[in-house]
């Protein structure tokens, strides 16, 4: 059987996200992002199409590098305003049975004891269909919002490693599997002898408590991480059960995918224990001509300053300071060189101008950009998976719900016909569905050593 | 028209709460508290019965004063394990239109910038049907869980006052009313000129940010507070739009209710700007005999050590150290005297023994305990409201859903017949439904001074 391609619908609780301005397209519903129905309808469409998950990215502040202020993203409704994504999940879970949910939460700002309770609660309410996208990022603007000093990059990962130790202890080590009896005859809910207090006193965090939630199906939620730095990749190799990247370049995607798998091996895990998703903007229609027409429409509604503002925050450089016709070779900054290389490669050696970074389909190299008829889109999707070793795609939001509906109605059935897409959901929790293994952390996962009653001979990190 | 009595169903995300052990009753569903359906069914029953709100209390740790460990509450499923209550609201909101939601969150532990976003998100998703029960409490066990030093009582209220200033600034002061255009023709989502950065640099908190959420219907969620100390009552007078208490004694309830209203006046507000709810355990059946039979059943399933453990945490004294037959006059401690007085009064001068504090119906004085036929229960409820000036009741959970269903099917129609209960929900947001005034903070509320564009002549605190 061919490899089964996995898909996440990639969303944020905001009017428009990866492509600035598209909420304004006549068929776009992004302006209703405050309504529960927007999210429950999305979930129902996704489950109808056997989409694996809704992946909820997040940002705790507006992108304000461009022009030194957030005006461009606010005008274009791009990632701002933005609501708390976690609160969308219970309503989406209530109208679905198999669809899984990923949600981003930041280790720097969320107190670990409270975060552990939130994820246990979600894991209970969803019957094990939840995952945590671990981020450690600290925008200066968010640090200011939180009244905190920014934490240097490497230190953040050290803190996140300790944070993970603490939440693993709470999730895996506090309650024995048979601690909860629910015995109405004996009138005993919990056997206290099988519940253990966690003692953590580390460099950054301290906790002396029983985890307040009984064990959920997954206990530790399924874990995403997507660090790109050396520290970030090592962190993903140790903790992540899924990772994601964003690239238009198959060779680069293969390189990153291999990097995650090597990092997993370095952490004592099987190489395929990290599922890898690449971001893809997919515009599909029954015919090539119709797809190209949609692309032209989307380009027409795409907002150039908004896109430039997003790229400015991404690379940490205020692109408003450059002549739009200037080559990006002249843009200076620490982060720019590898991005520049990728963009130039994407442009097949043609000069990339600053204005190109704000063009629809023209944030060169940012993600797979796949436009065409059902058949040609499926050809490209299959080629991506076959040639890069990725497991699937984070489907980038464009004009919704039109965009996801087209994927569900056109691409999924064609991929099923070709043997590349499941015809029904696998049973069980998110971890079982995504990894094919059990509901709990795999024995070779670092977090498994914190299981109560686990052998002290648990594998080393 | 008679005063319209208001009601909240008083819940926690746990198997049993105010009465230990009752989850084990054959008709109780409390053991399903991890399931979304438990909560959506509850919400539907409540809305069917024109209950005003689901009030979600919370506790961040197990009660462990009794015996110096949480065994008694764990065995009896009482307030432990406990999930995050906030995550229940989106699913309940999705299946209701008018039911309102109160949820407890602690100013000591929840970072204000993140809490403000969570409540704005909930206010959007519920279309203005959410309220925050502000608590500042700090159990030693929770401080240890959070890796924090306990904060002294009065200092906590000073911190909470500053916390409120900050969240009012975010909710009321960051976005002008017409900042969000949602103009698809002009392709402008937000007019950045009408969005303002908040600058707060106080003794405890700092924040330099735009509030990440656009204005919701209520902006500041409807506010509950229930402090009983001098500082706590003054805090409620300044901030609370609803308060609650727990007493079996009408004279005491009138005293507390008057105290909240005087505190509101002292803060420059109208006396009726604080709605007051008293806790009530109501056991009702068509006949007196049936109600007494239910009471006997509940008593039979009520767990004495669990109840004693809750009272021990409440009064801060380990009751396991006393002979069960000893008079509570011999129990020593700072908190005990007023409680002792109330309990003795409740017992009509009879000696109250330690074991009585663990008896069903026999945590003397804790709340209104109303058992009987529909007619007699309604008589008592009306008497409570007429004689104490309270606005309504927090209906204490016993054996659910049986208990709430009986209230909805028996008490509500009878109170409607007597003219004491609404026959349909009022339109609008929680604040409009509960206060009868507008969706936004009243002009005489302290938080109103933080409204952007508000007159600088806003009333003084």
Image (cartoon, coloured by chain):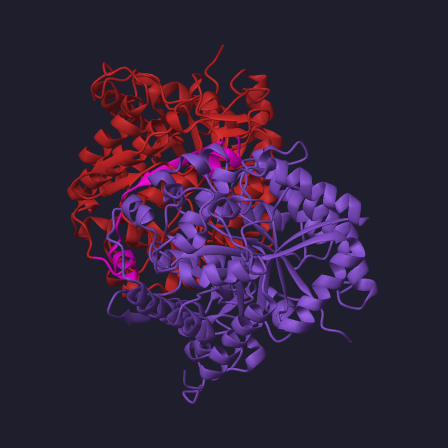
Chain colours: A red, B purple
Relative height, residue B456 to residue B131 (above, below): below
Q: A394 left or right of A66?
A: right
Residue at (59%, 21%) from the top-left corner? Answer: A424
- Indicate whether residue B109 is drawn in magenta: no
**B336 or A226: nearer the viewer:** B336
> Residue B25 location, x and y as percent?
63, 34
**B252 or B39: nearer the viewer:** B252
Which of the 4 image quarters holds residue B402? top right
Q: A346 left or right of B349?
A: left
- Res. A44 visible in picture: no
Quadrant where the image shows the C terminus of chain A: top left
**B114 or A458: nearer the viewer:** A458
Q: A107 left or right of A102?
A: left
Relative height, residue B318 to residue A125 (above, below): below
Q: Residue furthest bottom?
A: B457
- Indicate whether residue A121 is drawn in magenta: yes
Q: Which region is colored magenta?
A: A120-148
Which of the 4 image quarters holds residue A208? top left
> Residue A277 location, x and y as percent?
39, 30
- Res. B327 visible in picture: yes
Q: Residue furthest top?
A: A1
Residue at (31%, 33%) from the top-left corner? Answer: A197
> Residue A331 location, x and y as percent?
20, 53
Residue at (26%, 53%) from the top-left corner? Answer: A139
**B380 or A394: nearer the viewer:** B380
> Residue A236 location, x and y as percent?
27, 30
Q: How many marks?
A: 0
Q: Residue furthest right?
A: B417
């Amino acid at each position: 059987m061919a490899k089964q391609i996995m898909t996440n619908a990639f969303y944020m609780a905001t009017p428009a996200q990866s492509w600035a301005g598209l909420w304004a397209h006549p068929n776009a519903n992004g302006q209703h992002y405050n309504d529960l129905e927007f999210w429950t309808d999305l979930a129902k469409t996704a489950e109808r199409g056997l989409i694996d998950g809704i992946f909820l990215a997040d940002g705790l502040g507006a992108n304000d590098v461009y022009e030194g202020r957030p005006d461009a993203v606010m005008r274009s409704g791009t990632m701002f305003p933005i609501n708390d994504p976690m609160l969308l999940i219970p309503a989406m879970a209530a109208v679905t049975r198999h669809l899984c949910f990923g949600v981003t939460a930041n280790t720097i700002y969320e107190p670990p004891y409270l975060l552990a309770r939130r994820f246990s609660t979600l894991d209970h309410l969803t019957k094990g269909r939840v995952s945590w996208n671990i981020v450690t990022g600290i925008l200066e603007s968010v640090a200011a919002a939180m009244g905190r000093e920014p934490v240097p990059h490497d230190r953040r990962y050290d803190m996140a490693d300790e944070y993970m130790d603490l939440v693993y202890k709470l999730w895996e080590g506090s309650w024995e599997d048979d601690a909860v009896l629910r015995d109405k005859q004996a009138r005993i809910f919990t056997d206290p002898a099988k519940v253990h207090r966690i003692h953590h006193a580390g460099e950054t965090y301290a906790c002396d408590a029983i985890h307040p939630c009984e064990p959920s199906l997954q206990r530790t939620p399924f874990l995403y991480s997507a660090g790109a730095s050396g520290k970030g990749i090592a962190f993903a190799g140790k903790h992540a059960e899924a990772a994601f990247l964003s690239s238009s370049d198959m060779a680069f995607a293969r390189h990153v995918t291999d990097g995650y798998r090597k990092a997993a091996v370095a952490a004592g895990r099987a190489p395929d224990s990290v599922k890898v998703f690449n971001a893809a903007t997919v515009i599909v229609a029954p015919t090539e001509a119709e797809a190209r027409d949609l692309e032209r429409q989307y380009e027409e509604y795409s907002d150039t300053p908004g896109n430039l503002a997003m790229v400015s925050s991404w690379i940490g450089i205020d692109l408003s300071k450059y002549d739009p016709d200037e080559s990006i070779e002249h843009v200076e900054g620490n982060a720019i060189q590898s991005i520049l290389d990728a963009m130039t490669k994407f442009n097949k050696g043609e000069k990339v101008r600053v204005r190109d970074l704000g063009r629809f389909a023209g944030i060169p190299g940012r993600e797979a950009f796949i436009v065409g008829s059902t058949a040609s889109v499926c050809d490209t999707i299959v080629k991506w998976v076959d040639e890069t070793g990725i497991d699937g795609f984070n489907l980038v939001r464009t004009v919704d719900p039109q965009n996801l509906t087209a994927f569900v109605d056109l691409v999924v059935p064609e991929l099923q016909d070709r043997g590349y897409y499941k015809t029904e959901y696998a049973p069980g929790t998110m971890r079982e569905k995504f990894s094919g293994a059990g509901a709990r952390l795999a024995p070779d996962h670092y977090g498994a050593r914190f299981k109560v009653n686990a052998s002290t001979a648990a594998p080393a990190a």
